[in-house]
Image (cartoon, rainbow, N blue to C red):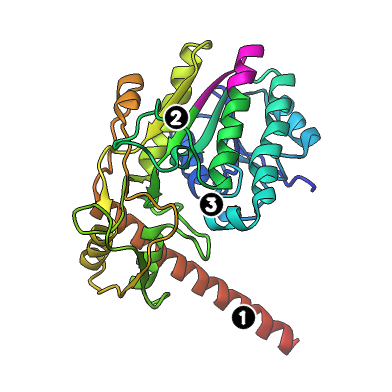
Amino acid sequence: MHAIRSNPPGKPVKPTVLITGGAGYIGSHVVLSLLDGGWPVVVLDNLCTGFRFAVPETAVFYEGDIADRELVTSIINDHDVDAIMHFAGSVVVPESVADPLKYYDNNTGKSRVLITAAVQSGVRHFVFSSTAAAYGIPESIPVSEAAPKRPINPYGWSKIMTEQMLQDTAKAHEMNYGILRYFNVAGADPRGRTGQSTKGATHLIKIAVEAALGKRPGVAVFGTNFDTGDGTGVRDYIHVSDLAQAHLLTLEAMMAEPLRNLTLNCGYGRGYSVLDVLNAVDRVSGMKVDRQFEEPRPGDPAALIADNSRILETIPWMPEYADLEVIVEHALAWERSLDARRKESNITRDTAIHSIAKD
């Protein structure tokens, strides 16, 4: 795939960071966090699930694939990249079960190509977007980084394999790593600059705000007999902008100590049930989201909550949006802005078609 590049004005004042998957949901928020902090940013995204509008013009943008080793190497060398933050990959758990080889290729095989290019080009720091799916069904709650890694789906295994590659690479080469294991990411940029834009997304809060705006008939609640307060599954929801800030602080810690490797859970250390989330969406939106109660899905743990003591002790991370209703409010605002964006796009397209027809 050919690269499409845009060059921002100005001179870099901090080491350049390459963001793979920077046009996607989490990646675009990290791009904003870095740019807000004065970091030069280069984004590489094949736009398979990302959106070009999510990348500000102040970042250099390349359209291309992380498996294109020649392209990756040229980007690193041309921009003197000192660090990579790697978000590119596939993230839908049921799809990984139906098509495991896609996930082992896209998430693991292509990551190997990227890591190889990074090592051979002298990149010193590598931050990896991992997942709490690494823990599978945990033996105890909350889950610490030391808990056994027992994924129950190819998505989780594809991430664990990349984690292992980074750990082995750091022992053999002068590159340190930061592995961030996310719990349930939700919300959107508080300033409305980016958010979860993927159609058919499987995140509960995304689904629920879509239902509140009439885009879905309701929300499926899988299981009501879990050993939790109200019988529905409990998860640790983290605001995407707080998560983005965790990436920036992790990178700063790695740069301060080049021999230091970090593996950190990213969550708030408390959980909300499915019904807690839906009730919050009802309150924030002023609409009643229809609940469709169904059988539990195989392998779903009753609760998945982060032990976040390590991240709080390791980096100066102070979450700003650790409130469920704030998370929902930002997600809902972004969903409404998406509606406006799509309506404007349709008007523009219809106008163009009408103009062509007249000509």
Query: Does residue 210 appear anywhere in the picture?
Result: yes
Q: What type is the residue that disc 2 sits on?
A: Leu
SS type, badge 1: helix
SS type, badge 3: helix
Q: Measuring 76% from the left and 45% from the top, which residue is drawn there?
A: 3
> Relative to 223, is 59 on the left or the right?
right
SS type, badge 2: helix
How packed mark 3 is, by other alpha carbons closer than 10 Å (few <14, some 14-19, many 20 or more), is many
Q: Horizontal and vertical percent for residue 33?
A: 44, 37
Instruction: Kindly identify which residue carries mark 3.
Output: 54
- Tell me which corner region of the image, top left, top right, bottom left or bottom right, holds residue 182: top left
Is residue 168 one of those drawn in magenta? yes
Q: Is residue 345 above or below residue 358?
A: above
> Relative to 290, is 193 on the left or the right?
right
Query: Does residue 62 appear anywhere in the picture?
Result: no
Q: Earlier in the sequence, mark 3 or mark 2?
A: 3
Q: What type is the residue that disc 1 sits on?
A: Thr
Q: Horizontal and vertical percent for residue 124?
A: 61, 18
- Which region shows up in magenta? 167-178
Instruction: Kindly identify which residue carries mark 2.
Output: 248
Q: Measuring 35% from the left and 26% from the top, which residue is drawn there?
A: 311
